[in-house]
Amino acid sequence: GAGVSQSPSNKVTEKGKDVELRCDPISGHTALYWYRQSLGQGLEFLIYFQGNSAPDKSGLPSDRFSAERTGGSVSTLTIQRTQQEDSAVYLCASRPGTVSDTQYFGPGTRLTVL
Amino acid sequence: AQTVTQSQPEMSVQEAETVTLSCTYDTSESDYYLFWYKQPPSRQMILVIRQEAYKQQNATENRFSVNFQKAAKSFSLKISDSQLGDAAMYFCAYRSLENSGYALNFGKGTSLLVTP
């Protein structure tokens, strides 16, 4: 079946602009995660959605970052007033929903803030 | 929060040889999951192998195996008969079973170069 998809693949923006990154999880997966991978770093957890529950936003680095998940499926990560330090690869992952399940990752969106 | 340490930023192996990538972690939890993910230049994170902490037997997936030492909090990945397609970044990851969400904590990765 189809894997996790993300769009756009690459995004170049100017400092101060807002950007939206999209994630389409695997059909039927109830859990969805956003991670950020900065140059030379491991992945940093940003936010987690599980079904219709309130999201776990504990990893968001500032109030310029927000995310929503509509209808328990597609998710959008929004970064307002982008800064150069926001430049990174943003990865989305989904998981079927039980404790033992593995997370499956999308190909990521590379964001470059000029 | 749990920390995951990969002490080898880069490793090199010749084709057909064996290489071991190191990973240590810090936790006070008794049950958890550990993972190795591979990230080729395409950026796609691919699950290589996973280990449940309550299982004493080391996980194996074809040419990939782990050496899980729970007391030492060590989780190394062994790649046997290395192939050119194994060249990638390898990330070790920890998943708690006690916090909500089960997000992964990643190490900073090891870049594996495979030479002909």
Image (cartoon, coloured by chain):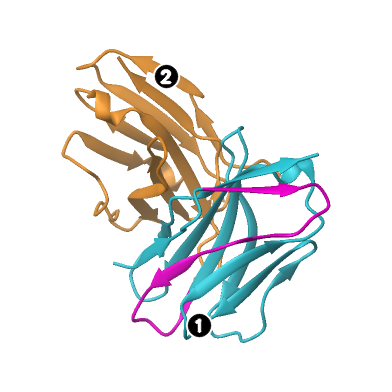
Chain colours: A orange, B cyan
Tell me the quadrant of the picture where the C terminus of chain A can be found: top left
Please state which of the two labelled residues, at mark 1 or mark 2, is closer to the viewer. 1
Query: Residue at label 2?
Result: A11
Q: Chain of mark 1?
A: B
Q: Which image quadrant for residue A81?
A: top left
> How many numbered marks does the figure carry?
2
Residue at the (23%, 16%) spot, across then down: A15
Q: Residue A38, position in %: x, y?
A: 37, 37
Q: Residue B38, position in %: x, y?
A: 61, 49
**Residue B35 visible (yes or no):** yes
Query: Residue at label 1?
Result: B70
Q: Amino acid at mark 2?
A: Lys
Q: Chain of mark 2?
A: A
Q: Residue B14, position in %: x, y?
A: 76, 47
* Image vertical order of residue A50 relative to residue B115, above or below: below
Asked if residue A105 is among those painted magenta in the image, a careful observer would answer no
Give neighbour class at mark 1: few <14, some 14-19, many 20+ (Cα, 10 Å). Answer: some
Tell me the SS state at disc 2.
strand
Which stretch appears magenta?
A: B10-32
